[in-house]
Image: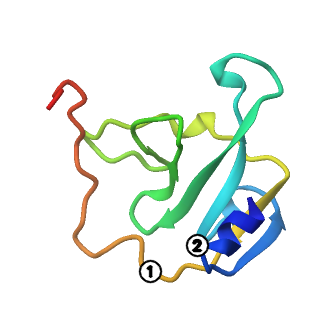
Amino acid sequence: MLQAIATAGLIVECRRWSGWSAFHGLGVLKVRDDWRGEKGRWHWVVAFRHSEFGVVVLDPHQDVPSFQIMPAEVLCMDFQIYEPKGDWFQVEQRIVLEASGLKPCATDLTNES
């Protein structure tokens, strides 16, 4: 994973997980996957800190994001299922991941078009 991120031209630093309160910026985190069935499973997610919603998690196994502070009327995953473990990668943040006045859009998963 470290090489994949570095190949994209981003500066990355390996860190030891010490809790959501110590997480800032942009990162690729190893999270437990036990809630999907088999014990001892894990996978990688992308997370970043947002001024309004706390931590936002983007999971490749989910169609919707997860917010530490859930926005009203937005379909999202429960933040509590994400329990990072071990090492994670702090990624150089070259772009701002939030903009003033932007809100997450409600996703209509029933629309097949």
Residue 102: x percent and y percent?
A: 24, 66
Q: Residues within 10 Å of mark 2 (few under 14, many from 20)?
A: some
- Residue 49 vs residue 112, the one in the foreground: 112
Alpha-carbon distance for marks 1 and 2? 11 Å
Residue 112: x percent and y percent?
A: 18, 27
- Residue 93 vs residue 83, the one in the foreground: 93
Q: Residue at x 53, y 35 (%)?
A: 61
Q: Which residue is mark 2?
A: 25
Count of number-bearing discs = 2
Q: Residue at x 24, y 39 (%)?
A: 107
What is the residue that sits farthest to the top in this orientation?
37
Check whether the beta carbons of the residues at disc 1 and disc 2 lie within 8 A of each other. Answer: no
Determine which of the numbered discs, if any, sits on residue 95 in the image.
Answer: 1
What is the quadrant of residue 21 in the picture?
A: bottom right
In primary-sequence order, the first of circles 1 and 2 is 2
Which element type, helix, strand or loop, lies under badge 2?
A: loop
Q: Residue at x 75, y 67 (%)?
A: 3
- Residue 72 vs residue 2, the one in the foreground: 2
36 horizontally vs 104: left or right? right
Which kind of residue does numbered mark 2 sit on?
Gly
